[in-house]
Image (cartoon, coloured by chain):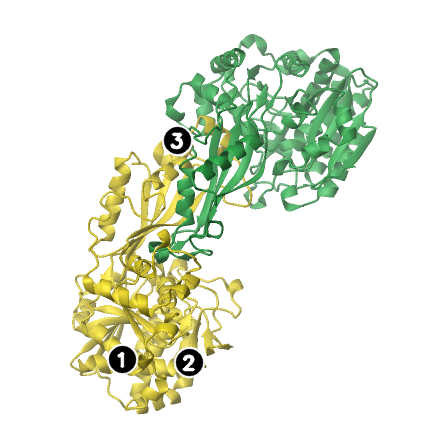
Chain colours: A green, B yellow
Amino acid sequence: MRDDTSLTTDRRTLLAGAAATAAGALFAPARARAADDLDPVRKALAANHDAAVKRLQDWIRLPSIAAENRAMPEGAAYMAKLATDAGFQTAEIVPTRGHPGVFATLDAGAPRTMGIYFMYDVKQYDPTEWSSPPLDAALVDKPGFGQVVVGRGAVNQKGPQATFLAALHAMKAAGRKLPVNLVLVAEGEEEIGSPHFSDIVTTPQVLAALRKCVGVIIPTGWQSPATGGVEINLGAKGVVEFELVASGEKWGRGPREDLHSSQKARVDSPAWRLVAALSTLVTTDGNTPLVDGFMDRVRPLTPRERELIRLASKNLSEAEAKRAAGVTRWIDDLSWEQALERLAAQPTINIEGLVSGYTGPGGKTVLPSRAVAKIDLRLVPNMTKDDSIAKLRAHLDKRGFQDVEVNVSGGYDPTETAEDSDLVRAMQATYTRFGVPTTLYPRLAGSWPGVTFTGAPVNLPAGQFGLGHGSGAHAPNEYFVIKSSNPKVMGMDDAALGFVAFLEEIARR
Amino acid sequence: MRDDTSLTTDRRTLLAGAAATAAGALFAPARARAADDLDPVRKALAANHDAAVKRLQDWIRLPSIAAENRAMPEGAAYMAKLATDAGFQTAEIVPTRGHPGVFATLDAGAPRTMGIYFMYDVKQYDPTEWSSPPLDAALVDKPGFGQVVVGRGAVNQKGPQATFLAALHAMKAAGRKLPVNLVLVAEGEEEIGSPHFSDIVTTPQVLAALRKCVGVIIPTGWQSPATGGVEINLGAKGVVEFELVASGEKWGRGPREDLHSSQKARVDSPAWRLVAALSTLVTTDGNTPLVDGFMDRVRPLTPRERELIRLASKNLSEAEAKRAAGVTRWIDDLSWEQALERLAAQPTINIEGLVSGYTGPGGKTVLPSRAVAKIDLRLVPNMTKDDSIAKLRAHLDKRGFQDVEVNVSGGYDPTETAEDSDLVRAMQATYTRFGVPTTLYPRLAGSWPGVTFTGAPVNLPAGQFGLGHGSGAHAPNEYFVIKSSNPKVMGMDDAALGFVAFLEEIARR
C-alpha cells in the first residue's frame, strides 16, 4: 500500500504496548478458539500449504514496478490468472492511460457481495541492502517469528493477498461454498499514488459490480508481534504530495544555471526565495499550518471520536509508541492522549525533502539556480486535495510568490467508514472470534486510496482486514510470516482461515 | 585555484565587454609590441616549445587529487623535480598533517627575490562528461582559439604554472641571467580549501625565505578572448564554508531516523527547524545578512575604491556580465555601477545547497531526521572567518537554536594588496608593455588563499599574474591555449615571455 510504512509503523506503535494493557479477557490463543466448524477448511489449508507458499513465492519473483515501467502488462496478466485460478469466473484487464488494472468477479450465487482491492505492483528496491535477494522469496527462519518468506512485496501486499487467494483455494478444495460473491479490483500503480485507479473503478462494468458490494477490503497481515492485536481505523487522512520549486527560470531573477557563489553579492538566490516562501507556510515551530484558509474545512472530532481516542490512550503504550517512532518527546510535550488526538485530527504540512544546488559531501561554492522542497499534506475530513492546493496557491500568490511552483505529483482526499457499518462490525466479530484484541481508532494518520471506494460514485465502506504478520514494507528484508513460532501472531494458513471466517461473517449480516 | 570558477567567471564577466568600451590606445597586437630585447628568449621559447608542451602534458597525466587521496606523495615529488629541472637549486618536500607541500629556492645572486605560489593538485573530474579524456592532455584545435591542450588542470593551474617553468627553461637556454631570485611554495590541497597551507608557509625556513620577497604571484592565464584584457584585483573576499545542520539527534526533538510523514502530526521536524533558523539569517529577499553584528567590522569602501569601481563601470559591459552570469536583472534592479560596487563591497550569506530527507525523483512520505544547508560566507576587510562564525553561533544561540550545528569545513580571511605596491605596479607595467588592456578593481568577489601571504606573519603583496588563456576550471573539457589563432590572446610561448618581462619589471623597481 502506498502508505504502508505509515500503516505498519502506526500499527506497531499503537499496538505494541497493548500486551501490557489490553483486557486479558479478549485474548486467547488463536488455535484453541478456532477449533470449530472451520476445521474442514483448516485441513484443506494444511493440505494445500506448499502450493499456497509456492504461489506467493512465484508472485514475488515477478516484480511489477510502475515507477520503472517494469513488467506491468505481465503483472496484470499474472494477476488475472491468479484470480481465475482461485475461482473467479471472469477476470479482465482494464486498460488505463497509465498501467492496466484487473477486474474479476466470482458469482457464488450468494445474496451478498464483497469487494476486494488488490495491488499487483511493488515498491522499488536496492538488492545490495538486502540480506537475502529481494526476488528469491527465500524461506528463512526469523528468530521470534518462525518461518518467513523474505522478498519485495512479501507483506506489501502480495503476502496478505496470496493468503486471501489461499483461502479461496482451500474452500474450493474443502467443497465449501463461498458465502459471498466477490468483486476483485486490482491496480498496478499503488506505489506511485494510484493516479488512474479511480478511472478503473469508474469503468461502467466495474462500477456496476462494486455497487452491489457490502464494502471493500484490502487484505493485510499486520498483527502486532507483541500482542497479536490489530487496529481498526474508521478512516484515514488524505494526502497530497507536491514539489515547491523556486527557480531563476520562473522567477526572472537569479541565475538560470548554477552560478559561482561570489555572484550572490549582486544576484538573487532561488534557494533563499524558497526558504522565504516555506517560512510562511507553518508556525516557526513547524507544527501548525498557516496557509490562508487551510483549516477552514476541518470537521472537529465528534464526541465518539474523542471517546475512541481516550480509550485508545488507555489501551496503548506511549513508551512503545515513542520507541517505535524514535522520539523522546511529542511536539509541545503533549500528553499521550493529546498526541493520539493530534495524530487523528491534525492536518499537517510536512517537508519530505529539500534539494538545491550542491548536495554531495563537503561544500561547493555555487549559487543554485533552483531549489525544491518536497512536501506532503495530510488532510482530515472535510478537507480535499483540490481545495488545499488551491488555498496554497492563493496563499503564495498573495505574498508575491507567484513564481514559486506547486507541482502536485499525487494524492487523494481523506476516507471515512462508519463504525456501525456491516464491514466494521464484521471485522470486529471476526477478530473477536479468533481472540485477537482490537483497538478502534477514528482515523489512520497515514493514507490509502480508500476514498476511491468510500467517496462518490462508489460510496462503500472500505478498510483493511487481515490476520498474520509481516513487516519491512518499502524497506530491505521485507518479510511475511509463513509458519509462526510466535503464539501471538498467526501463520499463513491460520491467517487464510481468518479470511474465510470474515467472509462468512459478512454473509451472516 | 579553489575559487577559480569565480575568478574566471568574474573575469569573463568583467572583461568580455571591454572590446566595445576599452580605450583603443591601450591595445596593440602583442607580437608587434614585444619585438624588442626579449627576442633571444623568444627564440629559445620557440626552440623549446615541444619540450615545454610535453612537460605540461606529462604533468596533466599525473593528477594529484587531495579529496581522493590520489597520487599525493607522487605529485609532491614531481613538483619538486619540475622545480629542480627548471633551475631551482633546492627543492624540498614539506610534510604537513595533511598532504605535503614543496618549498624550492633559486638563488640568482640578484638583489630582489620574487615569491611564486603553485598548486600541484587538481579538481576531481568525471571522465564521462569530457569530449576528450581528461588525462590524455590531447592537443586539439579549438575553433576561435587555436591549438589547445584539453585535460584536468589545463588552466587550473598546471597550464599557467608550466608556462612559468617554460620561461625559466628558456632563459637558461638563452643564457639570460634570471633578474630576480625565486622562492617557490607549492601546496597539494588547494582544491580542498588549503587547510594546511599556512603551516607550510610558516615553516621556519619557508617563512624566512618568503620574508625576503617583494611579493607573491600565482601564475594565471586568464586573458579575455574578446579583448585580450586582464583584470588586476587589489584583493579578494574571504570565504567560509560550513554546513548548518538541524537534527533530531542534537535537538532532542523530532526523529532520530527518517520517520513516516504521517507522524508529523505529533513529531517535530528538523527540516522545518532548519527553515526557521535559516530565515533569521538574511532579509526575506535573501540579499542582506541579518546575523547580529555580522557587518560590524566591515570597512567601508575608500574614495579610491569607489573611483576604481566607477572607472570599471565605464570600461566594462553590463550586458556581457549579465549574459555570462545567466541573469537578466541584478538584485533590486541595481544599476551597473551599483552592481559592481556590491560585488566588491557586500558581504554575503549564500546557500550552496540544501539536503534533507528524500532527494530522488518524485516524493516519498518521510519526516526527515536531519536537514542540512550548505552555506558560504563572503567576507570583506576587516571581517574575519573566526569572528564571523562566532557571531553566527551567538545569533543562533540567542534565538534558541543552540542545537543547530555550524560545521565549518574551510575558509580564510579576505586578502588585500596595495595599488601602489611594487607587485601591482610591475603587473601594470608588464601588461602595458604587451599592449594588454587592464582593469583595476578593488576586490575580487571570489576568494583565494592570498591572505596566507598578505596576512601575518608573511605580510607580502600577493596576486595573480599571467598572460595566455584557458577556461573550464572545475568543469569538463578544461583547456589551455598552446598556439593561439585569436589575435587577442597569447599562446603558451608568448605567455611565457610575459613572465620573463614581469620578473625583469620586478627587478627594475
- On the rendered structure, is A487 left or right of B443? right
Q: SS of the residue at dot 3? A: loop
10 Å neighbourhood of mark 1: few (<14), some, or many (≥20)? many
* Amino acid, disc 2: Val
Q: Quadrant of residue A104?
A: top right
- On the rendered structure, is B447 left or right of A273? left
* Amino acid, disc 3: Thr
Are the numbered discs 2 and 1 placed on the same chain, yes or no? yes
- On the rendered structure, is B88 left or right of B224? left
Q: Is residue B71 visible?
A: no
Of discs 2 and 3, which sits in the foreground?
A: 3
Residue lying farthest to the top in this orientation: A25
Kindly identify which residue carries mark 1: B430
The image shows residue B378 at horizontal and vertical percentages of 30, 54
Q: Quadrant of residue A195?
A: top right
Kindly identify which residue carries mark 2: B53
Of discs 2 and 1, which sits in the foreground?
A: 1
* Amino acid, disc 1: Thr
Chain letter of the residue beneath label 1 in the structure image: B
Chain letter of the residue beneath label 2 in the structure image: B
Are the numbered discs 1 and 3 placed on the same chain, yes or no? no
Residue at the image point whose x is 68% and y is 41% from the top: A64
The image shows residue B340 at horizontal and vertical percentages of 31, 61
Kindly identify which residue carries mark 3: A283
